[in-house]
Amino acid sequence: MSDDGEIDLDAIEKRMDGALTSLRNEFQTLRTGRASASMLEPVMVEAYGQPTPINQVATINVPEPRMIVVNVWDKGMINAVDKAIRNSGLGINPVMDGPILRLPIPELNEERRRELAKLAGQYAENARIAVRNVRKDGMDQLKKAKDSMGEDDEKIWSDEIQVLTDKAIKNIDDVLENKQAEIMQV
């Protein structure tokens, strides 16, 4: 809230957009049966005594829809990278080919697709909760500023916050619908 009793709608909108951005990042980690370099972002490799993101020890390419190729720069690190990918919980088993690891992405069965679609729904619900929490913070600001504004102004600000909330929730629902369609696609 600014000094003149105005609610900072830009800050509220930015926080709501942050929930959508976070959701998109979570969706990138879901394995949809299609290869994506972003699938490996959470993988940490034990390099030189400390955990290091995989993209700092290797080049990651996607030459075809069902294959990720990891080109390890330091040939002494190839076993550590292989181990990190196997232990990441992605369900991918690398195939060593010299300094290169080939990661074939297996087809998803129907049951696994349903599980992933359900998980995407949970991620989206968490994003909706985050948006509603931002809305609540905005309404709390409005209540604190109630003394310095009239009822008409309070109603206008309340409506503005609700419009931002509705827009953010709709965006989350749209992103979820697209992701679930991508997951269920055979």
Image (cartoon, grey):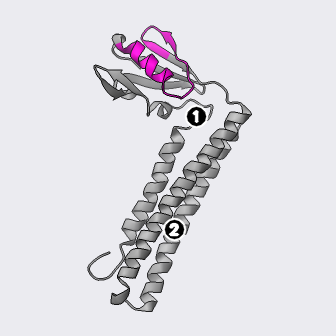
- Which residue in the rendered view is the most extreme toward the left? 3
The residue at 53%/32% (across/down) is 36
Amino acid at circle 2: Thr
Report x, y in % for residue 107: 67, 27
Out of 10 and 108, give the one closest to the viewer. 108
Residue at coordinates 38% horizontally, 28% vertically from top-left? 55
* Residue 19, horizontal then vertical, whole percent: 46, 55
Q: Give the range drawn in magenta.
A: 77-101
10 Å crowding of disc 1: few (<14), some (14-19), many (20+): many
Residue under the point 46% across and 70% down:
136
Note whether 155 is above or below 37 in the view shown. Answer: below
Image quadrant where residue 81 sits: top left
What is the spatial separation of the Cα atoms under label 2 and label 1, in whole angstroms?
29 Å
Residue 31 numbered mark, or none = 1
Q: Quadrant of residue 118?
A: top right
SS state under label 2: helix
Above or below 130: residue 30: above
Between 112 and 171, which is closer to the camera in this rendering? Answer: 112
